[in-house]
Amino acid sequence: MRAVLYIDKEEGTAVSDVPDPSPGPDDVVVSVDACGLCGSDVHSVQNGQCAPGQILGHEFSGRIVALGAGVTGWSEGQAVAASPLGSCGKCRICARGLAFRCPVAPNIGINAQGAYAQYVAVPARQLVALPPELPLELGSHAEPLSVGSQAVKLSGAGPGDPVLVYGVGPIGLYSIMALRLAGAGPIVAAGRSAGRRQAAADVGADVVIDTREISVEEYATQSGTRFAAVLECSAAPGAFTEALAVLEPGGTCVEVALTPEVASLPLFGMLSEGLHIAGACAFSDDTYRESVAHIAAGRVPVERLVSERVTLDDTPSALKRLQTPGSLVRIVSRPWG
């Protein structure tokens, strides 16, 4: 098959011919219809954080083309979305719903071969069936929607709660949709990219601010708004500290962006205001299944986020372009053209 392989930090990725995957006893092989280009993949390639020969790609959907000897309940040709997160289902970490931190089960596209490829091997337990009438590409949105949905769950935001989404990259945008599902509002989105700010309005933000013109703290002061929750999705320097400053008493800051920043923590304010802090970068199996159900039912306008669709041959250059995305929101790789 053809796949996008990581070469090295200087060259990045390139398309190559590699052996087709074969299913283990409890696996299936999926023919990849669509795989979203994730910012974590972009940064991993940019920073040289991949193993040579790694196939990235973890936001995908497709059809089953082969079944392992021990797999039941699935059939060849069936349309599926697939969570990339492995789980042994037995350890304390998996019992807490943190499958992505399981010490023994690999994660597809991270430490197992991923879906910037024509085929990918997937443990059957990670599959979720898609309705036959649903366009297959829509299933590739389930993974990033799950990241946003898990963050919303951790925030505790619900009906009538004012929420700030700080950062309007793809995860921030999926988080806005998840907040709409939870009934939260008003939802304020803050970011720099004009194209992505427009996307925030398109998918449900009530107010969108340009952080190049007004800071989050200035907006909160001028509008008299304090937030029940802030989802920090930007990784901008100082964003975490600023997020804490605009919370109402008892509010929650969920750090979603994978940031290397070592932020100061104003402990007196946190204690005196009864603030809560949580970290979220993945999701539980239940959240993934819920996301597929929301997409299948048409409750979330995920298709509005697609800026481009590219072939496998164009995927390496698309990963480079996303290092400086400008107005680009989401690019989807279509391995079969």
Image (cartoon, rainbow, N blue to C red):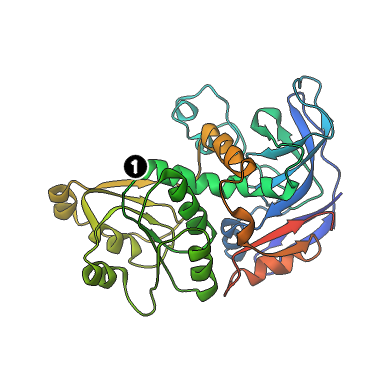
Report the residue marked by disc 1: 156
Q: Position of residue 263 (x, y in %)?
A: 31, 60
Quarter of the picture containing the C terminus is: bottom right
Q: Is 117 on the left or on the right of 306, as rendered?
A: right
> Callout 1: few (<14), some (14-19), or many (20+) C-alpha neighbours within 10 Å?
some
Q: Residue at position x 53%, y 44% from top? A: 146
Q: Secondary structure at mark 1?
A: loop
Q: How many numbered dots are placed on residues in this image?
A: 1
Q: Residue furthest bottom?
A: 213
Q: Position of residue 91 (x, y in %)?
A: 49, 24
Nearer the observer, 82 or 70: 82
Q: Examine the rendering and report whether any part of residue 307 can be seen.
A: yes
Q: Is 264 on the left or on the right of 184, as rendered?
A: left
Q: Position of residue 147 (x, y in %)?
A: 51, 47
- Does 176 appear above or below 153? below
- Amino acid type, mark 1: Gly
Q: Position of residue 78 (x, y in %)?
A: 79, 34
Where residue 83 sits, quadrant-wise, is top right
Q: Residue at position x 62%, y 49% from top? A: 141
Q: Residue at position x 28%, y 70% from top? A: 219
Where residue 108 sits, quadrant-wise, is top right
Nearer the observer, 55 or 167: 167
